[in-house]
Amino acid sequence: QVTLKESGPGILQPSQTLSLTCTFSGFSLSTYGMGVGWIRQPSGKGLEWLANIWWDDDKYYNPSLKNRLTISKDTSNNQAFLKITNVDTADTATYYCARPLTTAVDYWGQGVMVTVSS
Amino acid sequence: DIQMTQSPPSLSASLGETISIECLASEGIYSNLAWYQQKPGKSPQLLIYGASSLQDGVPSRFSGSGSGTQFSLKISSMQPEDEADYFCQQSYKFPLTFGSGTKLEIK
């Protein structure tokens, strides 16, 4: 059974760095073809893909966030991480980690709400 | 980036009615399209992948069709539990992009 769960700070101030952790089970990032991705959703709005990391440490980022994103993994502990630097109010959203396949995202975490406010 | 234009933004349907939601890609994506259902306060759930393949456990009243740039999601015989938001997503090219969503309500 595949599960993913996000954790994060809840609230942070503008210009700080957002650090998110995804703890998953039911698959391994040491297995060929496996990956973890991050997607966010502002309240009442649509979905925005942020980044993916794959079993071979290949990484893909959404260029709309320029160089603010860093995705990484800890294969031994079944975790993936996302950092977003220099946050502002536009980064307020629910952040999901998920398992991407080649044609879809088949499992999603429950999401973690992040609020950026001074 | 590939733009995904989803329509209609909202839809009201009667129980038992058949409905369709459309998704138009700004360039050809072959069959690299997925559909998701999202209920209030919940994470999205995969319904359809590869444009027309039904995810395990999804009721057969859901179906997907299309290829290239035009895609559709059909719900045959609307049920109360189908009231939700629906999103399409292309996985042909990075950055992965989603449609803006369709809110489906019961009339």
Image: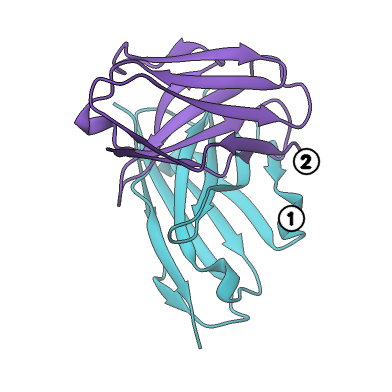
Chain colours: A cyan, B purple
C-alpha distance separating marks 2 and 1: 10 Å
Image location (x, y in percent) of residue A35: 55, 32
- Closer-to-camera residue (B10/A112): B10
Image location (x, y in percent) of residue A63: 76, 51
In this view, A43 is above or below A116: above
Q: Residue at x 71, y 59 (%)?
A: A65
Q: Is residue A5 visible?
A: yes
In this view, A5 is above or below B53: below
Q: Dividing the picture into quarters, in which one does residue A54 lie?
A: top right
Image location (x, y in percent) of residue B9: 51, 43
Query: What chain does badge 1 belong to?
Result: A
In this view, B28 is above or below A49: above
Image location (x, y in percent) of residue B38: 37, 40
Q: Quadrant of the N terminus of chain A?
A: top left
Q: Dividing the picture into quarters, in which one does residue B92 lie?
A: top right
Q: Residue at x 27, y 29 (%)?
A: B14
Q: Are marks 2 and 1 in contact (CB under 8 Å)?
A: yes
- Closer-to-camera residue (A68/A45): A45
Look at the numbered disc 2 and give the secondary structure of its residue. Answer: loop
Q: Residue at x 69, y 40 (%)?
A: A59
Identify the amino acid type marked 1: Ser
Give the residue pinned by disc 1: A64
Q: Is residue A32 visible?
A: no
Give the residue pinned by disc 2: B1
Identify the amino acid type marked 2: Asp
- In the rendered view, does B71 fall on the left or right side of A40? right
In this view, A28 is above or below B104: above
- Closer-to-camera residue (B64/A84): B64
Look at the numbered disc 1 and give the secondary structure of its residue. Answer: helix
